[in-house]
Image (cartoon, rainbow, N blue to C red):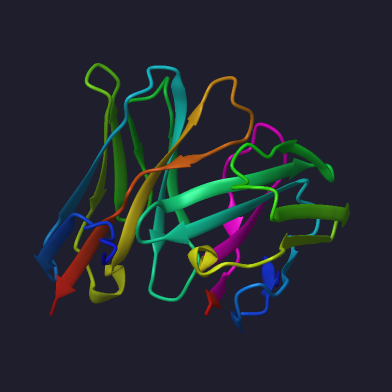
Amino acid sequence: DAGVIQSPRHEVTEMGQEVTLRCKPISGHNSLFWYRQTMMRGLELLIYFNNNVPIDDSGMPEDRFSAKMPNASFSTLKIQPSEPRDSAVYFCASSVGQGSYGYTFGSGTRLTVV
Amino acid sequence: GESVGLHLPTLSVQEGDNSIINCAYSNSASDYFIWYKQESGKGPQFIIDIRSNMDKRQGQRVTVLLNKTVKHLSLQIAATQPGDSAVYFCAENIAGSGSRLTFGEGTQLTVNP
């Protein structure tokens, strides 16, 4: 079991550029979550999907953020345009499905916007 | 001005001692709780969970206690080892909120050899 796979591990980009973070959940897991971790705000849920359908996106900060899950094995989180305040570690997590809360987290993507 | 980050609560223990990490929650509708461990540079890792119809649950070297009266959760680690050094988060699921987990601020545990 390779676990939840995120790419890239590190991303440094200039303000105004588009950033795309990628996630491959554990095979057979039906729920996928995107979290952001900062020193100021801790771990925040951005959005989660059940069976590829977005269920709760109330944590997405603003229209610059978008997330997609085109199939059960892939999800993206896009920031366009990026800003320095978006600098954080972004985690993807997956779980078996609705009602199962034992998430498995990926190793995260550390994003730095300069 | 300069931004100020979270100042994590810290707990420093000697190797071999028992550790107790505490967590308070505020929502009486929370019905499921999980403890996660996060090592530097890694994602949070599931340790143990407990449902609100239980007061205590034990795992390997870890015990979670739930006091619903005062909305308090604790994680006890027996015979703490240097490898236990990490940030520990409690997370809660509120009934009716779907699969959303809300995480606490975390506690930094340092184990001294």
Residue at screen point 19% across, 69% down? B110
Residue A63 rendering spot, x and y as whole percentages: 70, 49
Residue B38 rendering spot, x and y as whole percentages: 40, 64
Residue at screen point 54% across, 64% down? A86
State the count of labels. Answer: 0
Task: Between residue A36 and residue B36, name the one nearer to us.
Answer: A36
Residue B19 against residue B57 in the figure, above or below: below
Q: Is residue B19 magenta?
A: no
Q: Which residues are magenta?
A: A89-111
In the displayed orientation, state which residue is furthest to the right.
A71
Task: Between residue A66 and residue A28, name the one nearer to us.
Answer: A66
Q: Is residue A96 magenta?
A: yes
- Quadrant in the picture for residue A5: bottom right
Q: Look at the image and tell me in which quarter the C terminus of chain B lies.
A: bottom left
- Quadrant in the picture for residue A10: bottom right
Task: Between residue B112 and residue A14, name the one nearer to us.
Answer: A14
Residue A102 rendering spot, x and y as whole percentages: 57, 45
Residue B93 horizontal side relative to residue B66, left or right: right
Residue at screen point 61% across, 81% down? A14
Residue A68 against residue B68 in the figure, above or below: below
Task: Between residue A52 and residue A99, name the one nearer to us.
Answer: A52
Residue A19 horizontal side relative to residue A111, left or right: right
